[in-house]
Amino acid sequence: MNKLMFKLVFLGFFSVPSWAFADSANDEELCAQLKDAKTEMEDTLLQIKQRKQNDSAFLKALNNSQKQWMQYVDAELLMQFPSKQFIDYGSVLPMCQCVTRLGLVQERIVTLKQWLEPVVEGDVCTGSKR
């Protein structure tokens, strides 16, 4: 019985994915990627605002959208990691939070860049993208 238990623990240890042993260097790298993505998002927002500088209704809607999106990101993180006890998630929590935020920021960049790309001729649903 003890040999079986040892084998199960031994096999279980080696089946843990390598990312589960993330160190602070990996945390820093992922969070640096997040910082770069946030910078790209801010640059994209600035380009859109410059392009649409004479459209006050659009700018108001854009600012409101960005505010709501930031609340959405916070809500997503809270849903994914609802416990306020750090121990519930372990030392990988900062890395996991950066991964989650990075994915959401990258999605937002894709969405925002639609206002910088040329409109497809014949697309009648472009709205403010034109």
Image (tube, grey):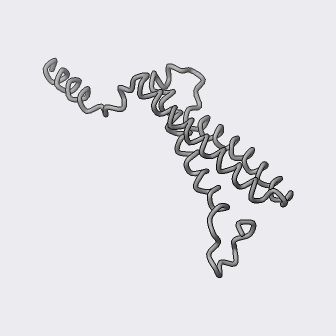
**In front: 39, or 22?**
39
Identified at 84% across, 59% down, the residue is 54
Percent of width and height locating residue 35: 57, 35
Where residue 37 appears, as percent x and y from the top left, is 56, 42
Q: Quadrant of residue 23?
A: top left
User: Among all residues in the image, which is located at the extreme bottom?
Assistant: 122
Residue at 46% across / 22% down in the picture? Answer: 90
Where, by quadrant of the figure, is residue 17 drawn?
top left
Where is the N terminus found, in terms of image quarters? top left
The quarter of the picture where the C terminus appears is: bottom right
6 or 30: which is nearer to us? 30
Q: Residue furthest left?
A: 3
Q: Name the spot of residue 79 as percent of width and height, x first.
A: 59, 38
Quadrant of the rendered structure where residue 52 is?
bottom right
Q: Is residue 112 left or right of residue 32?
A: right
Q: Is residue 51 left or right of residue 2?
A: right
- Residue at 48%, 30% in the rendered image: 95
Left/right of residue 29 with respect to residue 15 in the rendered view: right
Q: Position of residue 12 (x, y in %)?
A: 25, 29
